[in-house]
Amino acid sequence: MNTKIASLLLTNVLLVTVVACTDARTTSEAPAPSSSPTASPQNTQAAMDDAQSATRKKQLDSDIRAREQRNDAMGDTTKRPDSDLASEVRSKLEANIPKGNLTVESKDANVVVSGTVPLLNDLDKVKSLAMEIKGVKTVTIKAIVASN
């Protein structure tokens, strides 16, 4: 009896696979992609407002906390992968200096922040924000204030 059920199931799986494969289209037969809307000043401003919203800041802070909790549970709380450190510092800076154009690199927990910020006050915040990330040893700032 079990072999009959197994045989029936196998036959059904093969039948579904054959039907699915015959309906597949090749790239040349696929419909042309629809044109995407072009970026307008209104769309761009809406995207910038969304990126700078309180909700986005909460998401970034939550991501940082989750990574730190995972690291605490899985390993040494003082040793962190450089990729995690760079990502978390980048998130922290994005959440707190949303109009900055910053890049973050980390090697042996020594973080380097480069790029531009809109205000001198923002530049002054970079080091303290980066040092809030658990595992960061030093912060070198190569960023400058963007000239308007």
Image: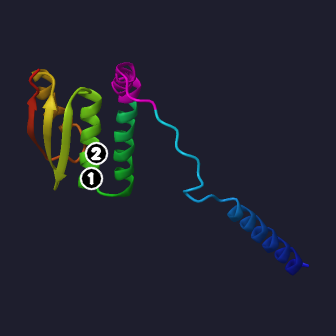
Q: Amino acid at mark 1?
A: Ser
Q: Is residue 99 a member of the stretch shown in magenta?
A: no
Q: Is residue 64 left or right of residue 118?
A: right
Overall secondary structure of the magenta section? helix
Q: In the figure, residue 114 lies in which quadrant?
A: top left
Quadrant of the image containing the N terminus: bottom right
Discs 2, 1 touching: Cβ within 8 Å: yes
Please give the range of residues in magenta: 37-57
In this picture, is 81 found above or below 113? below
Q: Amino acid at mark 2?
A: Ser
Circle 1: is it few (<14), some (14-19), or many (20+) Cα within 10 Å?
Answer: few
Mark 2 lies on a secondary structure that is helix
What residue is rendered at 40% in x and 23% in y?
43
Q: Residues within 10 Å of mark 2 (few under 14, many from 20)?
A: some
Residue at the extreme front: 28
On-image quarter of the C terminus: top left
Q: How many marks?
A: 2
- Per the image, the residue denoted by label 2 is 87
| Relative horizontal placement of residue 85, taking residue 56 as reference (left or right) | left
Which residue is disc 1 drawn over?
A: 83
Q: Secondary structure at mark 1?
A: helix
Q: Is residue 79 visible?
A: no
The answer to whether residue 34 shows anywhere in this view is yes
